[in-house]
Image (cartoon, rainbow, N blue to C red):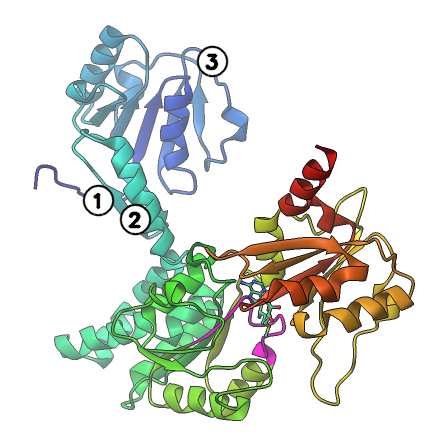
């Protein structure tokens, strides 16, 4: 180890920043929301003094002298002139402070690491001043996997620390308790902003000898590109004991899960449900009741034609703790990668996500309402009925020349975009020999897809 990172409590601590430029502002921003007493000396003016939400900052447009720096614990010096920086460092050190001199490590006592700030929990990455950009890169990677609500979780743990110590005197048992508390439902409740419920759950855990109940996360896996997983989806996936997934979730996404997580494939193709819905729900309940952290991983978003609502209801009925993590739905992903804006001030004032595949005996879409101009339709599960859908829309008044686009395997390496007009939608689908999931776009905006623009360029040439 070439550098040692120590942590300094900021309560009742005086921090001084000297300088007027961007480097000084960057140091000041570090202390936004902290309990430190921050004093800012900006001899060349206070550029953004009003916009920095520091609690009670004292900003002074002057160079500090020894009396100004007395009682300071940390002094950051961000001035251009090297001799001046050295002089200020001497004064600050004389006042008993630790000194950081921006861009001149040799003049200071410490360097500023790259921080990940979660209130009580602070992660810092230091490179001994050798590679600050590498430290920033590492910070982004670590930042992505750390839950946002770590601070409140640590605060709750702090509040319960004495109670836990009294209730569980044995050190090892206490460690096991905390491990379960930090991995379990209490942490999930903190993450969704329910600290009171989280507190109750931790106390329940403390007072029952029974093993912790499992939990189900119904998670949107997005359209197939693993980079389109949300940070939260990635985190719960990496924390899961069991992953129950269906056909729309590709290996590239599953590969982001914990390696030793059990994977249960429950299939589902249109009209051929490998495992019936009620059995999928029973499986989720059974695994959760066995104390497992279950991720029910579904393509796109669970609440957009994903039967996530039914599964949520089933978990609630069974009394299983359940959370929903949204995902990027196919319409959004396909539109983005095909370059089709879903709304456009000149062409579409609304967008409708609609399925052409209603439940047997269910309600058919109201094509008459959906046939109006200046709107975009994103049709899920529509390939099998493309010709009928086009006929219904045209019969209800939509122009035959309305642009359409078919996006197959949207966001995946084998994505295809096929464009044309509404009167030929059935033919386009038939000729395309689709093998992957496909989304149909109908509306003026479909003309913006890169594929359609290429066709127009060819015609013009
Ligand atoms: C049962 S729905 C599930 C939708 C999913 N819950 C969502 O939010 O995207 C399946 C349909 O979504 C569409 N779909 C899903 N992933 C897709 C992708 N990567 N590319 C194109 N369409 C996709 C297709 O229309 C497919 O038939």
Label 1 crowd (10 A; few <14 / some 14-19 / many >=20) = few
Q: Are marks 2 and 1 in contact (CB under 8 Å)?
A: yes
Disc 3: which residue: 45
Nearest to viewer (mark 2 / mark 1): 2
Q: Are marks 3 and 1 in contact (CB under 8 Å)?
A: no
Element on which disc 1 rests:
loop
CA–CA distance between discs 3 and 1?
Answer: 32 Å
Query: Whole-Å distance between the Cαs marked 2 and 3?
Result: 31 Å
- The answer to whether residue 304 is magenta is yes
Q: Quadrant of the N terminus?
A: top left
The residue sitting at the left extreme is 1
Residue at left 40%, top 91%?
A: 286
| Label 2: element kind | strand
Q: Mark 2 or mark 1: name the one nearer the start of the chain.
A: 1
Q: Is residue 353 visible?
A: no
**Rendered image: mark on residue 124:** none
Q: Main secondary structure of the magenta part?
A: loop
Q: Is residue 170 above or below residue 127?
A: below
Q: Magenta segment range?
A: 296-309
Ligand 1 - quadrant of the structure image: bottom right
Q: Nearer the viewer, residue 425 or 194?
A: 425
Q: Is residue 82 above or below residue 434?
A: above
> Circle 2 is placed at which residue position?
122
Q: Which residue is label 1 attached to?
A: 7
Mark 3 and mark 1 lie on one chain; the one further toward the N terminus is 1
């Amino acid at each position: 180890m070439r550098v040692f990172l120590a942590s300094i409590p900021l309560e009742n601590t005086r921090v001084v920043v000297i300088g007027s430029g961007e480097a000084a502002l960057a140091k000041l921003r570090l202390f936004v929301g902290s309990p430190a007493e921050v004093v800012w000396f900006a001899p060349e003016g206070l550029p953004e003094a009003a916009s920095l939400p520091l609690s009670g900052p004292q900003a002074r447009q002057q160079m500090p002298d020894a009396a100004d720096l007395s009682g300071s614990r940390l002094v950051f010096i961000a001035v251009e002139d090297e001799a001046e920086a050295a002089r200020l460092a001497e004064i600050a050190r004389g006042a008993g402070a630790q000194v950081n001199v921006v861009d001149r490590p040799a003049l200071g006592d410490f360097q500023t690491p790259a921080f990940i700030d979660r209130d009580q929990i602070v992660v810092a990455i230091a490179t001994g001043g050798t590679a600050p950009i590498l430290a920033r890169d590492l910070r982004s990677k670590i930042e992505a996997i750390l839950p946002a609500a770590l601070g409140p979780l640590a605060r709750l743990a702090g509040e319960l620390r004495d109670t836990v110590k009294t209730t569980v005197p044995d050190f090892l048992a206490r460690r096991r308790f905390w491990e379960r508390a930090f991995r379990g439902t209490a942490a999930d409740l903190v993450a969704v902003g329910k600290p009171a419920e989280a507190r109750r759950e931790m106390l329940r855990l403390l007072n029952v000898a029974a093993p912790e109940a499992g939990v189900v996360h119904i998670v949107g896996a997005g359209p197939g590109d693993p980079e389109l997983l949300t940070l939260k989806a990635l985190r719960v996936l990496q924390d899961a004991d069991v992953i129950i997934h269906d056909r729309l979730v590709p290996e590239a996404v599953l590969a982001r899960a914990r390696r030793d997580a059990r994977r249960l494939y429950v299939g589902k193709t249109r009209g051929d449900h490998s495992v019936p819905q009620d059995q999928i729900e029973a499986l989720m309940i059974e695994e959760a009741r066995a104390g497992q952290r279950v991720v029910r991983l579904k393509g796109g978003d669970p609440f957009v034609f994903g039967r996530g609502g039914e599964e949520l209801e089933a978990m609630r009925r069974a009394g299983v703790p359940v959370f929903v993590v949204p995902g990027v739905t196919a319409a959004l992903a396909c539109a983005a990668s095909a370059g089709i804006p879903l709304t456009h001030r000149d062409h579409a004032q609304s967008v409708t996500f609609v399925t052409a595949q209603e439940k047997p005996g269910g309600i058919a879409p109201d094509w008459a309402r959906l046939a109006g101009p200046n709107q975009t339709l994103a049709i899920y599960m529509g390939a099998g009925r493309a010709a009928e859908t086009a006929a219904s829309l045209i019969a209800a008044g939509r122009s035959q020349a309305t642009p359409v686009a078919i996006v197959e395997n949207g966001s995946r390496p084998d994505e295809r975009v096929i464009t044309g007009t509404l009167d030929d939608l059935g033919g386009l689908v038939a000729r395309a020999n689709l093998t992957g999931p496909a989304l149909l776009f109908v509306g003026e905006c479909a003309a913006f897809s890169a594929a359609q623009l290429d066709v127009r360029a060819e015609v013009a040439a």
